[in-house]
Image (cartoon, rainbow, N blue to C red):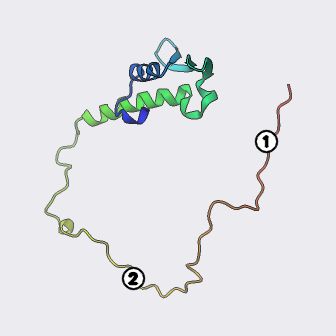
């Protein structure tokens, strides 16, 4: 739902959620910084903190998403301070739109064999210690 908007504002987010029966309750400081988000789903009659749902719905993530869309608009409209920074179309590489063929390296295939993936099934992870009350 959020990805269809190039410019996401708090009002847009609130309206879209309200159409789906969800109220967005935000807690803000005096400067307007969002420090808490609560989602109230009236259809299913449940209430969630944003961070309980997922990292993407935490107060920080939503405020960055809203602020990020505003920054993208500002960056798009901001004029360049350095004149003449455009690419010159009359360079030598202008007509060259293909890749050069790879050079013959003469290295044995054993040296260039399979690369290891990040997933190693036999390595155990350390477990987090549980906190006692």
Q: Nearer the viewer, residue 83 or 29?
A: 29
Horizontal and vertical percent position of residue 96: 22, 70
What residue is shown with label 2?
103
| Disc assigned to residue 19 | none
Depicted 67 relative to depicted 25: above or below: below
Q: Residues within 10 Å of mark 1 (few under 14, many from 20)?
A: few
Query: Could you tell me which quadrant the C terminus lies in?
Result: top right
Of all residues, the one furthest to the front in this rendering is 43
* Residues tagged 2 and 1 counted as in contact (Cβ below 8 A): no
Circle nearer the N terminus (2, 1)? 2
2 vs 1, front mark: 1
Residue 39 visible, this orientation: no
CA distance separating discs 2 and 1? 49 Å
Q: Could you tell me which secondary element the residue under label 1 belongs to?
A: loop
The residue drawn where x is 60% and y is 21% is: 44
Figure disc tally: 2
Q: At 41% from the left edge and 19% from the top edge, which residue is drawn? A: 15
Q: Position of residue 94 (x, y in %)?
A: 18, 65
Q: Position of residue 39 (x, y in %)?
A: 56, 20
Residue at image x 21%, y 43%? 82
Q: Position of residue 41 (x, y in %)?
A: 56, 19
User: Quick check: 80 above or below 95?
Assistant: above
Label 1 sits on residue: 128
Question: Residue 77 falls in which quadrant of the image?
Answer: top left
- Residue 100 visible somewhere in the drawing: yes
Quadrant of residue 69 within the rendered picture: top left
Give the side of residue 30 with respect to residue 94, left or right: right
Q: Residue furthest top?
A: 30
Looking at the rendered structure, the secondary structure element under dot 2 is loop
């Amino acid at each position: 739902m959020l990805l269809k908007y190039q410019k996401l504002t708090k009002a847009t987010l609130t309206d879209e959620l309200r159409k789906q029966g969800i109220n967005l309750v935000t807690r803000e400081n005096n400067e307007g910084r969002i420090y808490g988000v609560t989602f109230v789903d009236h259809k299913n009659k449940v209430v969630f903190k944003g961070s309980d749902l997922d990292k993407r719905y935490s107060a920080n993530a939503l405020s960055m998403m809203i602020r990020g869309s505003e920054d993208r608009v500002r960056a798009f409209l901001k004029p360049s301070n350095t004149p003449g920074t455009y690419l010159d179309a009359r360079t030598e590489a202008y007509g060259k739109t293909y890749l050069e063929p790879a050079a013959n390296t003469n290295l044995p295939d054993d040296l260039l064999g399979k690369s290891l993936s990040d997933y190693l099934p036999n390595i155990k992870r350390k477990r987090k210690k549980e906190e006692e009350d």
